[in-house]
Image (tube, rainbow, N blue to C red):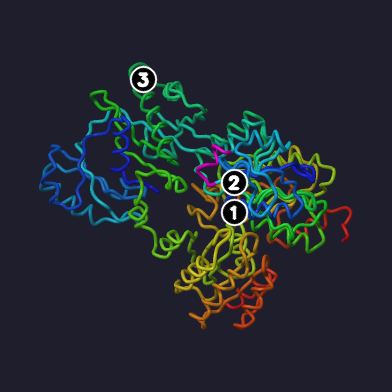
Amino acid sequence: MILVNKNTKVLVQGATGKMGASHTKRMVAYGTQIVAGVTPARGGSKVPGTEIPVYDTVKEAMDATGATASVIFVPPYLVLDAASEAIDAGISLLVVITEGIPPQDTAKLVAHARAKGVKMIGPNCPGIITPTEALLGILPGSIFKKGPVGMVSKSGTLTYEIALSLSDANLGQSTCVGVGGDPVKGMEYPEVLTMFENDPETEVIVLIGEIGGSAEEEAAEFIKANIKKPVVAYIAGQTAPPGKRMGHAGAIISGGKGTAESKMKALKAANIEVALTPREVAEKVAKLIKQPVTK
Amino acid sequence: MDLYEYEAKRIFAEFGIKVPPSARITKPDGLRTVHLGYPLTLKCQVLSGGRGKAGGIQFAKDLKEGEAIAEKLLAMTIKDSKTESVLCEPKVSIAKEMYLAVTLDRSRGCPVFIAAADGGIEIESNDKIVTMPITFPYSSFQGRKIAKAMGLNGALHSKVADIANKLYRLYEELDLDLAEINPLVVTAGEDVLALDGKMTVNDDAMGRQERFNGWADKHMADLPERERRSKKAGLNLVELDGNIGIMCNGAGLTMATMDMVKNFGGNPGNFLDAGGGSDSEKTLQGLEIINDNPEVKVILLNILGGITACDEVATALVEFMKRHPERKMIVRLRGNNQDVAEKMLAASGTKLYPDLEDAVKAAVAASK
């Protein structure tokens, strides 16, 4: 497993909002150690429907609870400020779920996080799950099973679909990381791939990409040079027309660049197995697993 | 949101970047009150590129010729973009044409200057382009740096550095995805002018840019009707030429579903991402929009409930099928409250496919 486990102490920024509160409850129900909520001017209260204390500032919450990770649910225009507060307070891991953040804010945030050595996942991402240990984000926990497959993905529901295929085939996951579908983001494929490479519990890595940008092509080069564990890739958007934004802010073929074809070609050239359907991902992974896991 | 040239130029002027004097007309006889002298440049105000090549920029030697040209230009549509108005400017005598832009570089994760000291217009095929990452916090030396990287010296270096700094400032202040001056010209009198400009406002930032309040409608005029309806409903629609209507929750899953349709021998008619956590009303709107596409033979609905509750989707589906009992539907629902949804849909006789591949195959078969 990577990034999070059952001992990770987590605070939630925006835990008193509607979405923040409902997902905080779900994360707690999954077994995640949610130790604090942070909402300015709400210090002293509890996260609605729970006994989790709310603090005015991230600093207070960290001092009182020892939290090292923050999950951010605050509205888009407040994310840059909220995340900067967490970085300033000394947080180690930031998971930004919020969608619709103006990209110039994200660029400033990413520069800040990198300068301070803070690991940042997202924005516009489903979060991270280490099955049976911890869930930071909005992923539906029941779909995931514990096992040897590490997953890294730009997408939310497509990750669930592929996790479902894997779990149905009894291929559990070590950790699944949704890096998000925005053009500018915190962690990119190479950082997550390196963590899986160094994680003794991960045997096979699944990389889920989509059209737009060149992150998958760069990942292919990176894998060829640095990753010894087998990788199975899936790229969404083979039928996407050029010049149209396909839902995610980053999913657009522009000036003939960022096509699924180019990404699949680059991955295959790096000897990476490319699956054409979610089920085929599971079939290819099954062949690469040394010790099939049993229920 | 893309801006028209005249809107971009007003913003340039406001931020202290020099532009030629100009007047905008919406009727040919509007030219009678334009006193900029002749020869006069007349330019179609459209949101598409390739305007010059399409004949959207013309020169008039007098009022009579100007009115005839204006009439022609006002009736033009260039690459699906209807002429909104015509911008008139005195013809500028050009000594040098340059290119200067600020945009976000996704692989570097930061804004960049893109510039060229020679030529503009066909910037994509220009081999003298320089790109410079912009670092935070922004400081004026970055304008001097890009002007130097363009190979400029002396007074021209100072002028272009100043324009670059102003361009970055407006890019940041107005939350733009792109601020482009093309061409940035040096006149015979050694003035540096933004002769044409392009700006794209980031869609996600529209809510905090008060000056653009209410602009979205006008700037969506060129979008096809169903795409415009989707945008207003907060749905993401891209139409294709196939006959299988597709609606899913989540962009990646929607693309993957389209790809599977194609791989199993069908033709996707659209991409429609209902987004995470869509309620029944939004789902119903989405289904109606797909249903209005005359090419669509069958609708494939694929919902994997994470945030989205299956019973919310089922509520929309029951209502939709009441309205359109003849519509062929293939429904895949899995996730939160799936059992409730199943009961609701069983009452209306809809078969549910828990497996995505089975659902896609059924949709392809129904489309033949």
Look at the image and tell me whether residue B232 can be seen: yes
What kind of element bears circle 1?
A: helix
Nearer to us in this view, A211 or B232: B232
- Whichever of callouts 2 and 1 sits on the residue coming sooner in the sequence is 2
Q: Residue at 47% across / 26% down in the picture?
A: B138
Q: Which residues are magenta?
A: A75-82
Judge from the rendering whether residue A276 lies leftward or rightward of residue A211; answer left or right. Answer: right
Q: Amino acid at mark 2?
A: Gly
- Residue named by callout 1: A19
Residue tagged 3: B158
At which x and y percent is residue A219? 67, 42
Tell me the residue that label 2 is attached to.
A14
- Dots 2, 1 in contact, CB < 8 A: yes
- Seen in the picture, residue B163 relative to A185 is either above or below; the reply is above
Amino acid type at image mark 1: Met
Q: Is residue A151 visible?
A: no
